[in-house]
Amino acid sequence: MIEPEILRAAEAHLRRRDKKLARVIDAHGPCTIGGQRRDPFHVLCSSIISQQLSSRAADTIQARVVAAACAGVRFKPAHFMALTPEALRACGLSNAKAKWLRAVAEVNHADAAYFRKLGKLDDEAAIEALDALPGIGRWTAEMFLIFALGRLDVFSLGDAGLRRGLNLIHNHGEKLDDEATLAITARWAPYRSVGSWYLWRIADMKAVTAA
């Protein structure tokens, strides 16, 4: 959980370092990222389910998995170890995602302290450890750091929503290359996760308008 006073300090820092982002902060109000504790295993499974899907499709499939696996409570390793791959595929998951969820469940079942140990690593070491798991790439690991571990200084270069939001406020919607993107977001350190939260707000609004 991220304390509110830390978020207010982050917002003030971002306002000073990026005047264009400051206007977004003023428009959307206080950041609420990390406002409540989130179960690491549940976050990781949700991230796997969401890979390469729109928000709407991911929410639909996750709702089906929740109904099949745990009847509305948080995902636990035992839920995925009890379900067959066929049952998971019937929820709309690919065969690969069904296998990855089972593999992550087995890792956590074998070592109940796995996520606690992960939380003691620095950002890059944690990303490297997660990347070694089946089906977990850098984007999924970065989402885990932000939403499960409450890390404050993560910007995911591979996140389409973040790139879209940054393009909108800094380049009139035209695509910025990786170097320009990293140069802009480097100014937000050590609060790039908070800056990312505001970019997602912009990207979500644009998507709704386009729909």
Image (spheres, rainbow, N blue to C red):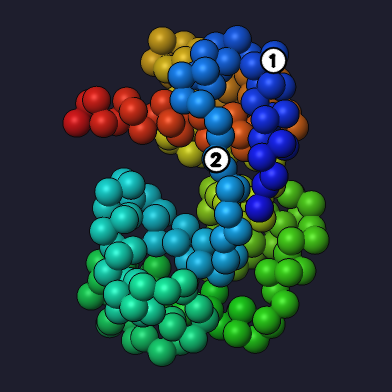
Task: Please determine whether, in this image, residue 86 is positioned above or below residue 156.
Answer: below
Relative to 17, is 199 on the left or the right? left
As rendered, which of 34 and 3 lies closer to the eye? 3
Q: Which mark identifies residue 17? A: 1
- Residue 67: horizontal and vertical position, in percent? 29, 75
As rendered, which of 144 and 179 lies closer to the eye? 144
**Quadrant housing the C terminus:** top left
From the image, tell me which residue sits under label 2.
Answer: 32
Relative to 47, is 4 on the left or the right? right
Task: Please determine whether, in this image, residue 165 is positioned above or below residue 79.
Answer: above
In terms of secondary structure, where does tag 2 sit? loop
User: Which comes sooner in the sequence, label 1 or label 2?
Assistant: 1
- Residue 164: horizontal and vertical position, in percent? 42, 26
Type of amino acid at the residue the image marks with label 1: Arg
Relative to 108, is 66 on the left or the right? left
Q: Residue at x 66, y 53 (%)?
A: 1
Relative to 114, is 143 on the left or the right? left
As rendered, which of 136 and 41 lies closer to the eye? 41
Task: Please determine whether, in this image, residue 117 is positioned above or below residue 202.
Answer: below
